[in-house]
Amino acid sequence: MAQVSAQAETIHAQALVIGAGPVGLFAVFELGMVGISAHVIDILPHAGGQCVELYPDKPIFDIPAQPRISGAELAERLLQQIAPFEPTFHFNESAQVLERIPQEEGGGFIVSTASGKRFRTPVVVVAAGSGAIVPKRPPLKRLEEFEEKSVFYAVRDPEQFRGRRIVVAGGGDSALDWAIELAPHAERLTLLHRRQEFRAAPASVERMRQMVEAGQMDFRLGQICGLVGENGVLQAVQARHQGETFEIPADACLLFFGLAGRLGALAQWGFEMQGGQIAVNTENFETSIPGVFAIGDVCTYPGKLKLILSGFHEAALMAQKAARYVFPGRHVSFEHSTSSTILAKKLHQG
């Protein structure tokens, strides 16, 4: 952890939440319930994290009282829930440096971002999921030439693929879900996978096979090995199977080979780490750095389950301890939301 350096204008925050995914958003609510207002930073241009960026329409079934809800809907409802607490969001920002402020200067931390913003806060909550989520890229020559022009790792606007020849490469849920979704609107869609077995939900595999049988999409065994085209305009995808190389005509290619999480600069902050995750205690989810907490997929402890609802639980306990740093000397009493004077006042003002 670096020593404090001066310069850019400093933003004062009662708490800084790193990550605007579902767990980070709910952390804003729990902090608000103990009277703490939060600033939130996220590397993405919007709230919702991985749920919105990669799987906005994918259903989630284990959110209490929501038999079925999409990632985008969950993020929107969480934003509605925290609106009374008026959090301040800073998007397209990545936390880089954590600096400890000496007690004789008031204590707490300075967190600096890649763009040069500086936040002074007594409490830092890391809710960064698996870190900066990046797609796994195959080792293809000239891949960069085609990326985000005719080769993509996610579908943000399905309409851009209407009437086009599409190759979907991969064998997981994302590959099959999007192949099934886009096939009816494509000129022709080919699902390319290196084997007959898939890692996707059985219902999706069955639906895909039915569509192939009905001639609504093609399935080819093989592994992508090259791209044909010029100046980012794709003409065909090259693939190889059992020593034979073949081409599939294509205007667009979707690559779904999984995701990799990177903690990036956060991994250099001096946390106790276990298996690439931040170690925390289960009393309040504080890290080995007092005043810095970690919740959600980014943290680990005995019995940890990587579930959104687990992150919600972690956020609730985190907030109780965070209040002791923000309001030293003040008695922090637990209140149910039904009788919370803080929440009642916020809702009345709204």
Image (cartoon, rainbow, N blue to C red):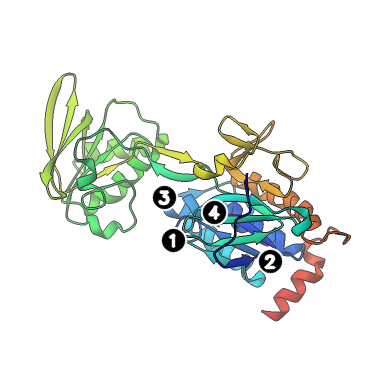
Residue 186: give x, y in percent of width and height. Answer: 20, 52
User: In 3D space, how far apart are the residues under numbered discs 2 and 3 (Cα atoms)?
Assistant: 29 Å
User: In 3D space, how far apart are the residues under numbered discs 4 and 1 (Cα atoms)?
Assistant: 12 Å
Provide the secondary structure element on which disc 4 rests.
loop
User: In 3D space, how far apart are the residues under numbered discs 4 and 3 (Cα atoms)?
Assistant: 12 Å
Give amino acid for label 1. Answer: Pro
Mark toward the viewer: 2 or 3: 2
| Mark 1, residue position | 45
Q: Is residue 182 visible?
A: yes
Image quarter hosting the C terminus: bottom right
Provide the secondary structure element on which disc 3 rests.
loop
Q: Reading the chain from its start, which is encountered first: label 1 or label 2?
A: 2
User: In 3D space, how far apart are the residues under numbered discs 1 and 2 (Cα atoms)?
Assistant: 21 Å
| Mark 4, residue position | 21
Image quarter hosting the N terminus: top right
Give amino acid for label 3. Answer: Leu
The dot on residue 54 is: 3
Residue 327 is left or right of residue 52, and the answer is right
Q: Nearer the viewer, residue 151 or 214?
A: 151
Residue 51 is left or right of residue 100, and the answer is left
